[in-house]
Amino acid sequence: MAIRILLLTLGPGVALGLGRFAYALVLPLMQAAWGLSYAQGGLLGSANTLGYFLGAIVSHRLLGWLGYRRGFFLALLLQGGVLALTGADGYALAFALRLLQGALGALVFVGGAALLMALGSSGRSLGAYYGGVGLGLLLAPWLLLGADTPESAWGRLGLGAFLLSLAPLWTWKALKEPPPPARGEGSLRPILPLLLAYGLYGAGYIGYMTFVTTAVGDWTLLFTLLGLGALLTGVVWGTWVERVGGKRGLFHVLLVLFLASLPPLAQGLPGLSAFLFGLAFLGVITAVTQAFRALLPPSAWPRAMGLSTAAFALGQALGPALAGLGAEALGRGEGALWVASLLLALALPPVWPRRG
């Protein structure tokens, strides 16, 4: 069982670690080769988050129609080709492919989590799955070492994504489909505060990830520390949320994320800030998933995962713009970090622990 879970963690590593976050490392090459403005680079990032949002919205129905196993593996195996072609023919094609990669990434993320939940996996197992994003964060700088054109950079990411996507196929027979929705049960009312907090988390976390290098610099080091922290998600937060419960654990991990994002820490001790942020940002997803399991019947879990991912994606689409306004207001990157911290602080009241 443990080996199967470890293999499935490659899904988020490919779809998010390489598919989404490695874009920050390739963007300077694209700007140099294609003459992209910062606005055009931002639009490519927005295309990816828009695709993720659209994929999350339709994930429940699409994966239910295709079958969660078939949909998960199809979306995962397509990652390599989509990434490899992104640098092939200029801006218009890159925009379309970033949109498509985002949609496929949502299907991978939601589908894999639903399959693990159907197996009755523990919080630690789910934390390990989400923490797989950290593997992509760690591998991306090494895959891109020596790449000097957008074509070569995206080609390397595509090849790496394809090779990593093959190993999870070994788990096919061990996985089972989530139960179909049952009529008359599965109201999502109990999780509405969690969805609000999750959307604010999406806005705050991406604000930090987008602008921390503007305020601090040395992206390669920060990428490595973020990845190392993320890989520990299952060990740290998976264990903790099993002990205290998903909703209470969600408050705790959001509090750590908020503290890690504060500009005095990010600018004074950037390595510590990046490590703590990496450790916590996927712990939020672990806690939310565990809360769904406690608050909802199994037939409602896949739908809840899809809607929570959509709320996250919507916040993620808004976060960079709001943080950018903060940077403009202060005239420096520190303003963006303050906005990101504020958004994370606003995520805390909806999940404030209550007695009884």
Image: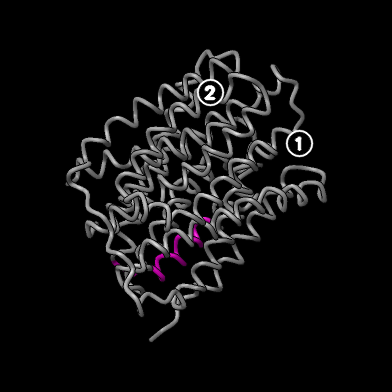
**What residue did someone put label 1 on?**
39
Mark 2 secondary-structure assignment: helix
For mark 1, does the 10 Å Cα neighbourhood hold few (<14), some (14 to 19), or many (20 or more) residues? few
**Residue, far front:** 65
As drawn, the label of residue 301 is none
The foreground one among 267 and 279 is 279
Please tell me whether residue 101 is drawn above or below residue 189 in the rendered image: above
- Asked whether residue 188 is drawn in magenta, I would say no
Residue 354 position within the rendered picture, expressed as x and y whole percent measured from the top left: 44, 81
Point 49% across, 29% down: residue: 82
Residues shaded magenta: 243-257
For mark 2, does the 10 Å Cα neighbourhood hold few (<14), some (14 to 19), or many (20 or more) residues? some
Q: Magenta stretch: dominant SS?
A: helix
Residue 222 position within the rendered picture, expressed as x and y whole percent measured from the top left: 53, 35
User: Amino acid under label 2?
Assistant: Leu
**What residue did someone put label 2 on?**
85
User: Amino acid under label 1?
Assistant: Ala
